[in-house]
Amino acid sequence: MNQINVLVVGQQDNTWTQLELELKKIEILKMELKGFKLLLAKAYFDKGYSLTNYFFKLVAVFGLTTQMAQETFIILFCYSIFCYFFGRWWYAHHLVETETEINNMFNPFVKEMRAVH
């Protein structure tokens, strides 16, 4: 609760930049939401996996055709770690917001809502 009060004082004094305000909001969310860190890690992995899922299919074909199970598991373990860090990079560079905006450009509902306002 003390951090929320500090956030309000900081906003009134205009001493914090927008980035600092966003970081404070994230810290408050971490304390209030259950499983925030776990679900954030899941979001990172899911984004990395969704962007590179074709590579996973190539590894599956490799594993099925060569029958080299140990090498396939090593490749999949490395791929899983890569998915997490690639997703984290994707979020850190705000490419998720860009993706959402591009999707909104073609979404009829969003077009209609933006035209009204």
Image: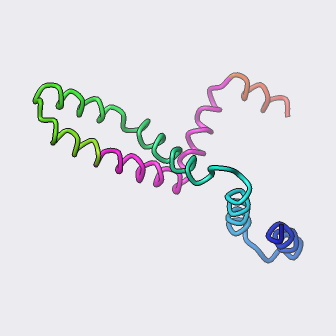
Residue 104 in the figure: left or right of residue 7: left
Residue 52 in the figure: left or right of residue 47: left
Measured from the top left, where is residue 95 in percent x and y? 53, 48
Q: Quadrant of residue 1?
A: bottom right
15 or 83, nearer to the observer: 83
100 or 67, nearer to the observer: 67
54 or 41, nearer to the observer: 41
Is residue 59 depicted above or below 80 in this figure?
A: above
Which residue is rendered at x = 48% and y = 41% of the image?
A: 47
Is residue 29 depicted above or below 100 in this figure?
A: below
Within the magenta stretch, is there residue 85?
Answer: yes
Which residue is rendered at x = 72% and y = 66% of the image?
A: 24
Measured from the top left, where is residue 82 in percent x and y? 35, 50
Is residue 73 depicted above or below 30 in this figure?
A: above
Measured from the top left, where is residue 59 in percent x and y? 23, 34
Q: Quadrant of residue 8?
A: bottom right
Residue 91 in the figure: left or right of residue 83: right
Measured from the top left, where is residue 19 in percent x and y? 68, 66
Q: What stretch is highlighted in magenta?
A: 78-107
Which residue is rendered at x = 56% and y = 50% of the image?
A: 40
Q: Quadrant of the C terminus?
A: top right
Q: Main secondary structure of the magenta part?
A: helix
Within the magenta stretch, is there residue 17?
Answer: no
Q: Farthest top residue?
A: 108
